[in-house]
Amino acid sequence: MSVKVRFAPSPTGIPHVGNIRTALFNYFFAKANNGVFILRIEDTDQARKIEEAQGAIKESLLWLGVAWDEYIIQSERVPEYKKYALELVEKRLAREDSGAIRFIVPKEGKTSWQDAVGGKKIEFKNSEIEDFIILKSDGFPTYHLANVVDDYTEKISHVIRGEDWIPSTPKHILLYKAFDWEADMPIFAHVPNVLETDRKKLSKRRGAKSVLDFKNEGFLPEALLNYLMLLGWSPKDDREILPRKDFEHEFKLENINTAPAIFDERKLLWMNGEYIRKSQISKLKSQILEFDPTVSSIPNFEKYIPLAQTRMKTLGDFRDLVERNEGVILNTKQRKLAEKLKEKYLKISNLEWNAASISNATIAVRDTLGVSTKDIYEVLTGSPQGLPFEEKLEIQGRSDTISGLEAIIKNKNK
Ligand code: GLU
């Protein structure tokens, strides 16, 4: 069977990471099976349409490196759906109801399918399904009709979507039967929800973040992609950091978990740090610059990258780690320390200014004054912890270090 799948968001809001996770499952399922991945904008509910949603959906996917083979906008096909609705009226399988068209659900029997997630049979009694609208009085199709007509005409082989859509599936199957399309019915795979750590459903209303929010917070697309792929799916072994090609080769519907997945931002943060450490310096440099072009004005900023790379969790951490906070107000002990350090550093020549000599000088001062490493950090960097100070100061240079010390010593005097 040739694989053709679709991600079919309704542009009613900016998609959150759980929605995009479903897009990724579709995309990698297509990749793993040499199939086709369609992006279909289901915008037939004109009243709920939000202008910026369509752009945000595309931008989110492209940032993650997910490109679609075909792009379809349902609102451009409105007359088409109407034809199909009228066909059912003609067959007496649908009826007109104050300008709208309702599908007539058979009162007897059951509708069931074998879901590809978990392999279980899911069954609904037809008597529990009400006659549902397929074409509204404004001439626009409802989700059910447009979704089924498109899945059929586009020859979708697998419908991979969130489990929230399970109650809609019997309606879709009944439509396939009514149109005599049963032989071409796709395989349904309903993916468990993504939950917050409090086990409540990830939802835009509760502030669930979008892919673009994470982009703006300094996450790497490859890290977010990796993290999202493991929400409800896992490879056979316990690997957590997987290169993209592994998803392309290994993604299988059978390995989707039946239990809901928990979105744990701390884990994502950890993973982002791992990706930052794996990144090549030149690539990390362009990612840091793209995230915050103004870091280029930090003197020697490039030299800090290998050093900062070991400590960063997000791209935004670079500036925090590298920039000296000169606003810090020193206590008496720290002020004394700053003066002593300045004195000692002045004795190191420009040529001798390196991590080893800086370390020796600093340790000598620490031991004489009996201060803590935290004090040293605070005085030298303006924060209680950070990059190894001797290497940081070597890059920063002798004169900047000394003028920095002078600046914070003055703070106290104000
Ligand atoms: N338009 C639906 C949504 O917003 C599509 C569900 C489906 O994939 O069938 O999620």
Image (spheres, rainbow, N blue to C red):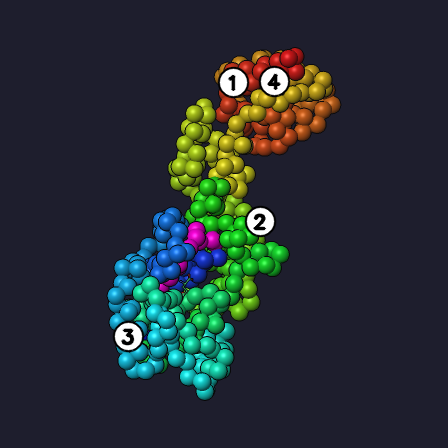
Residue tagged 3 = 86
Mark number for residue 266? 2
Q: Which circle's residue, 1 or 4, is located before the other in the chain?
A: 1
| Kind of residue sitting beneath label 2 | Arg
The range drawn in magenta is: 4-17
Mark earlier in primary sequence (3, 2): 3
Q: CA distance from mark 1 to mark 4?
A: 12 Å
Residue 292's spot in the image, x, y percent?
Answer: 43, 34
Is 312 in front, or is 91? 91
Asked if the residue at tag 2 contacts the one at tag 3, i.e. Cβ–Cβ closer than 8 Å, the answer is no
| Residue at the image position 43 percent from the left and 25 percent from the top | 297
Q: Position of residue 171 (x, y in %)?
A: 42, 75
Q: Ligand 1 sits in which quadrant?
A: bottom left
Disc marking residue 169:
none
Q: Amino acid at mark 1?
A: Asp
- Residue 47 visible? The answer is yes
Q: Residue 408 got which mark?
A: 4
Q: Quadrant of the C terminus?
A: top right
Q: Amino acid at mark 4?
A: Ile
